Structure formats: C-alpha cells, structure tokens
Image (cartoon, helix red, strand yellow):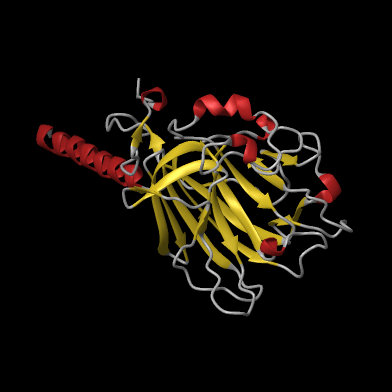
C-alpha cells in the first residue's frame, strides 16, 4: 500500500516536472493590435497635437491596421507614426504588410511604396510639434516599382547610429539583401531585437540584415539640428553616443497607403529563475522583478 502511494506521488511529481518544462518552452506571443480599434496605441502626426488622428490617417478595417490617405488632397509633410503603449528592450516582433494603390499627391519621390516600423523609439508624447521622425531605428519597408531590384527590410536610422560587422555603419539607410516584392501582395516580416547589442531583420523567414552596438547619434555627423523639424536638438546633444537599449515600437505613415495585420510580439525579457512559475526557457534578459513563486 505504501509503495503504491509512493509510486503515485512520484508519478505526479514527474508529470508536474514535465508540464513545467513544457510550459517553460511554450512561446507566449502577444497581439499588439486587437483588430477592432486602436486601443493601446498613441498617434503623433507632424504639425498635429498628440493623438489627433488627422484625416483618419490610421484606421481599422477588416481586422487590419491601415495607413490611409482617402481623406487627403495633398500630403503636406504630415509624416506620422502610431506608437504601441509599452516600451520593450529584448523581443521578437512579427507582422504582415502590403502596400495599396498610389501615393498621395505631394509625397516625396523616395516615399513611393515606402513605410517602416520603428524600434527603440522615443515616446509619441516626447516628439516636438513639427517633428517628422522619432529618434529610433527603422526597419524600412519598401515595395517594388516594377523597375528592377528594390529591397525591403532595410535599416534607416533617424537620430541613431549602429555598427555592422564590427565597424561603424557610415550611412543613414542600409539595404538588406531581400528579394523585391512588386505589386500589392502580403509580405511577412519579423525582427529580433536584443537591447543595444544586435538587431536582426527577417523577411519571409530569411535573415536579410543584422547590425550591432545601437547608439543615439543625431545624424551621421552627430548634429541633431539636421534632423527633420526636431525642435529640441540641444536636449538630445548630451546623449550623443550613449547606448540605446529600449524604447517604443511605432508604425510609419509616409504618404503611401499600407496595411498591417498579425502584429505579434514575443517578449524575451523576463524571469530567468527556473524555480519561478513564470520562468521561460527562451528569455535572454533577466528581470528579477518579474519573478513569481508558489507560496
């Protein structure tokens, strides 16, 4: 009888351990966009107050987060971004995007089928009134123009600088080695962001670009006054060359309509103590304050 009871206890403990191991490996992806409204997001458009969704630039239709210019007659430099409410440092983010129709009149030639997603961004509330772009890293999304190669998943760096292969990357925008996506097709994109150490861009599951040593940097010569319509350059100047390890995620409105869907994030920062009930084996950055234990 005692042996049977002991065997039962050991079996239960074994099953509990297996369940804990399985739970620790299971990836907890979270949806950043609920498919119904813009809850959890802040909007900042150049020349407009915080959360003024000028001419319904950002809207929700058919489960998509859409950048729309239906109500525009002319672009008028209304560069915009929509920012997720929570900052992150170590994470994976995945989504799908597609470009739609023609560019709104008044947009720059380089903005045809051009958008992006920003990482480690300053908050929406901290942008100055006429500021075009946040200090951030941009995973640039480009659509093909039917005229030869045009890569997507590139890097642009408003107010930031990075290294590639151990050397300073002396360019504002750096091409990936992705293929070209012509037409209005959906494209799968992902980024792996690991604090200030390294960022990977993936298109359709393939790594197309990687860069390291993320820093605040103004323009390439370190002059924040040359950033487009930033009014507080003096406030940023003391931060020149400091590491940039976290920030907000933002989607870009740059004069060409684009749709986003399936925006999901896997946080890679959390409790790395295996004794905690919320331990995850895939975490890469320990956050002791997040640990939860059984009482």
- In the image, residue 116 above or below residue 84: below
| Foreground of the two, 152 or 82 | 152
Lateral position of residue 142 relative to residue 292, left or right: right
Residue 280 visible in rendering? yes
List x then y, in percent, for residue 279: 34, 35
- Above/below status of 246 relative to 104: above
Taking the spot 45% from the left edge, 50% from the top edge, the residue there is: 170
Please identify the quarter of the rendering in which residue 100 is found. bottom right
User: Residue 244, how many percent across, how many down?
Assistant: 46, 35
Camera-side residue of 148 and 257: 148
Q: Residue at x 33, y 47 (%)?
A: 25
Asked if residue 84 shows in the view, the reply is no
| Residue at the image position 53 percent from the left and 51 percent from the top | 172
Q: Quadrant of the C terminus?
A: top left
Outermost residue on the left side: it is 3
> Total of numbered circles in the picture?
0
User: Which of the 4 quarters of the picture holds residue 148?
Assistant: bottom right
Image location of residue 267, percent across then percent down: 45, 41
User: For this rendering, which residue is in front, 187 or 123?
Assistant: 123
Q: In this picture, is 293 found above or below 187?
A: above
Name of the residue lying farthest toward the top: 295
- Indicate whether 294 appears above or below 139: above
Q: Is residue 202 left or right of residue 17?
A: right
**Which quarter of the rendering shows the N terminus?**
top left
Compared across the picture, whether 233 is left or right of 11 comes to right
Quarter-of-image position of residue 260: bottom right
């Amino acid at each position: 009888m005692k042996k049977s009871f002991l065997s039962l206890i050991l079996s239960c403990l074994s099953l509990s351990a297996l369940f804990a191991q399985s739970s620790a490996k299971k990836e907890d992806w979270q949806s950043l966009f609920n498919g119904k409204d813009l809850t959890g997001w802040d909007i900042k458009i150049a020349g407009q107050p915080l959360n003024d969704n000028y001419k319904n630039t950002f809207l929700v239709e058919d489960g998509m987060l859409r950048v729309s210019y239906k109500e525009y007659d002319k672009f008028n430099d209304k560069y915009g971004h929509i920012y997720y409410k929570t900052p992150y440092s170590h994470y994976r983010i995945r989504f799908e995007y597609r470009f739609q129709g023609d560019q709104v009149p008044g947009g720059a030639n380089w903005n045809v089928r051009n958008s992006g997603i920003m990482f480690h961004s300053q908050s929406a509330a901290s942008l100055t009134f006429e500021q075009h772009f946040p200090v951030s890293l941009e995973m640039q999304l480009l659509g093909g123009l039917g005229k030869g190669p045009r890569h997507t998943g590139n890097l642009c760096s408003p107010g930031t600088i990075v290294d590639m292969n151990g050397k300073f990357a002396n360019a504002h925008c750096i091409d990936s080695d992705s293929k070209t996506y012509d037409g209005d097709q959906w494209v799968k994109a992902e980024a792996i962001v690991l604090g200030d150490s390294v960022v990977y861009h993936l298109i359709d599951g393939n790594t197309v670009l990687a860069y390291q040593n993320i820093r605040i940097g103004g323009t390439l010569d370190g002059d924040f006054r040359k950033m487009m319509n930033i009014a507080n350059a003096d406030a940023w100047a003391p931060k020149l060359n400091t590491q940039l390890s976290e920030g907000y995620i933002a989607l870009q409105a740059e004069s060409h309509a684009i749709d986003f869907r399936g925006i999901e994030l896997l946080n890679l920062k959390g409790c790395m103590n295996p004794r905690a009930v919320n331990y995850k084996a895939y975490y890469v950055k320990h956050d002791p304050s997040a640990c939860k234990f059984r009482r």
